[in-house]
Amino acid sequence: MDEEITKTRLSALQFDHVLEIGCGTGKNTRFLVTRAQHITAVDFSEEMLSIARTKILKPEVEFLQADITQKWNFGERKYDLVTFSLVLEHIENLDFIFSEASKTLKPGGHIFVSELHPFKQYAGTKARFHNGHELQELQTYQHHVSDFIHSAEKADLQLQSLQEHFDEDRQELPRLLSLIFQKI
């Protein structure tokens, strides 16, 4: 669902230089590389990056391992777009993240966020994966919708769009939340 939301939500935006935070195995990088001249794809996990590097063999993509909870040092490039896909639930301090992201943006640039909807978290849903032996749950932090908006505002980012995304039956709580901010 995140992959489809990313394609749909970013289709109306123009961007040449992208900073993709939480690129994982490259599922969204594949789309971004069709639209951008350069992508800096960042992830905390070297294992995930190794998989992405084997799937995406394009010179316009630079894969970097980094801890985004520390001061960002992704070069001197300024970006038109910074994306976060299913990563901010693992970050405690949103103010720091939005501040660092804003510093990397060109004036008028955008930030795109796609996250597990807070309602799902309230109901007990957490990020998890099966490592081949057992189910692993990752450390997560609950962020309310207003937390995303207030942290972005503190970093001179203005909310342009907010959408809630449901599974097909729409009988449950919304599954994902997506937000687009623009640097003022």
Image: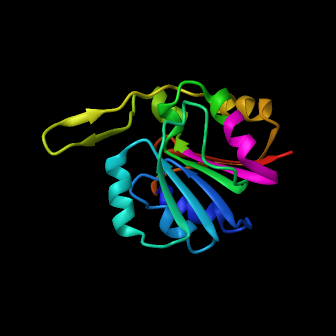
Q: Position of residue 10 (x, y in %)?
A: 65, 63
**Could you say which is closer to the camera, residue 179 or residue 119?**
179
Q: Is residue 24 above or below residue 73?
A: below
At x 58%, y 62%, the residue is: 39
Q: Classify the position of the C terminus by image quarter.
A: top right
Q: Is residue 102 above or below residue 55?
A: above
At x 67%, y 27%, the residue is: 95
Q: Is residue 107 magenta?
A: yes
**Could you say which is closer to the camera, residue 98 or residue 163?**
98
At x 38%, y 37%, the residue is: 127
Q: Quadrant of residue 158?
A: top right
Q: Position of residue 91 (x, y in %)?
A: 52, 30
**83 lies left or right of 154:** left
Q: Position of residue 49 (x, y in %)?
A: 38, 53
Q: Position of residue 38 (x, y in %)?
A: 62, 66
**Colour scheme in the image?**
rainbow
Q: Residue furthest right?
A: 184
Q: Is residue 173 above or below residue 154?
A: below
**18 lies left or right of 103:** left
Q: Quadrant of residue 19?
A: bottom right
- Number of numbered markers: 0
- Magenta residues span 99-114
**136 lies left or right of 46:** left
**62 lies left or right of 158:** left
Q: Residue furthest left?
A: 133
Magenta stretch: dominant SS? strand
Q: Is residue 9 magenta?
A: no
Q: Residue furthest front?
A: 76
